[in-house]
Amino acid sequence: VSLLRAPEGIDGEQFFQKHAGRLAIADIKHLDQALDPEHPPLMEIDTQKALVGAVQMGAVEFHTWGATIDRIERPDHIVFDLDPDPTLPWQRMLDATTFVLDILDQLQLYAFLKTSGGKGMHIVVPLGRFHDWDHAKAFARAVSQYACDQQPERLTATMGPKNRVGRIFIDYLRNQRGASTVAAYSVRARPGMPVSIPICPHELARLQSAAQWNVGNLGERLDRLDEDPWAGYANRQRITATMWRRLGASPSAGGS
Ligand code: ATP
Ligand code: MN
């Protein structure tokens, strides 16, 4: 886990912390130094006590890797981070989300959705831990590229504000070793304290923004939910040769 800490409140200075610092957090685990040799240890939170301990130290956002410590070289999901040109209407984000979901559906991959709590959507594809980082990232890139090739006037797979003018960037770069994404149900240290929340695809049509749900109205949403939007989430999916073929792409040499 990486922490975004805002010890003075969300209007004050914010620190994005990937490594254990001098601040002692109750019950937090420090990972093997060899995982990231040039730095202090990476951190793991797997108890409520550690979670609360981090909050006591001013942590507001919790960002996680795409893998867990027991098999850290094998990602257990990939994520597509849809980042809009901020001037685009919200409907364009909904259209792009639906479009990527349709592609994943055609590939016969189950995907799960969450708001970022900021500007966009995160599409999560759980994977069995069969593939290494290079393979998962190459696949995410291929899906992103495939989507963009079909809607080049609306979507881009290339980073940088210039490429994003009038478009939505389908960021696949979260799928590399050491990269992180805000966790589902994490609060965001932004005005109104929005929350990154899981939603069902059928809720998309009514979703008003990626920051619709926040610490103030989250309770209301949870009370009204009759099923977990991520019910059925299971890390068993595998990237297959058929999927690569349908995308017209191939895994880069070295991946497995
Ligand atoms: P939005 O919808 O507004 O794009 P988001 O959560 O997708 O929200 P950011 O909050 O901009 O996007 O996240 C930036 C990414 O970089 C995340 O993957 C986060 O884990 C990571 N990150 C955030 N701050 C830092 C930092 N200071 N240093 C390194 N990585 C960071
Ligand atoms: Mn984003």
Image: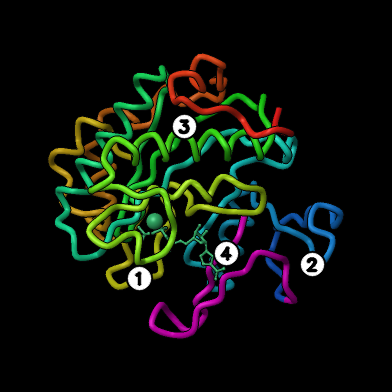
Residue named by callout 3? 125
Say whether disc 1 or disc 2 marks the residue closer to the N-terminus.
Answer: 2
> In the image, is 34 to the left or to the right of 87?
right
Q: Earlier in the sequence, mark 3 or mark 1?
A: 3
In the rendered structure, are the residues bearing label 1 and label 2 in contact, judged by CB atoms less than 8 Å apart? no
Magenta stretch: give its range.
1-22
Do the residues under discs 4 and 1 have CB atoms within 8 angstroms?
A: no
Question: What residue is pinned by disc 1?
Answer: 190
Ligand 1 within 8 angstroms of badge 1 C-beta = no
Tell us which disc is closer to us: 1 or 2.
Answer: 2
Residue that label 2 marks: 39
* Badge 2 element: loop
- How much space separates mark 4 and mark 1, taking CA atoms? 14 Å
**Spot occupied by residue 131 in the image (x, y as percentages of width and height):** 66, 29
Q: Amino acid at mark 1?
A: Arg
Q: Which residue is mark 4?
A: 3
Quadrant of residue 98 in the image? top left
Identity of the amino acid at label 2? Answer: His
- Crowdedness near tag 3: few (<14), some (14–19) or many (≥20) residues, C-alpha within 10 Å: many
Left of 82 or right of it: where is 52? right
Measuring from the top left, give residue 111's x and y in whole percent.
40, 29
In reply to whether residue 3 is colored magenta, the answer given is yes
Q: Are marks 4 and 2 in contact (CB under 8 Å)?
A: no
Q: Is residue 98 left or right of residue 187?
A: left
Identify whether 34 is placed above or below 122.
Answer: below
Please tell me which residue is depicted at 27% across the width and 69% down the height of the picture.
192
- In the rendered image, which quarter contains the N terminus? bottom right
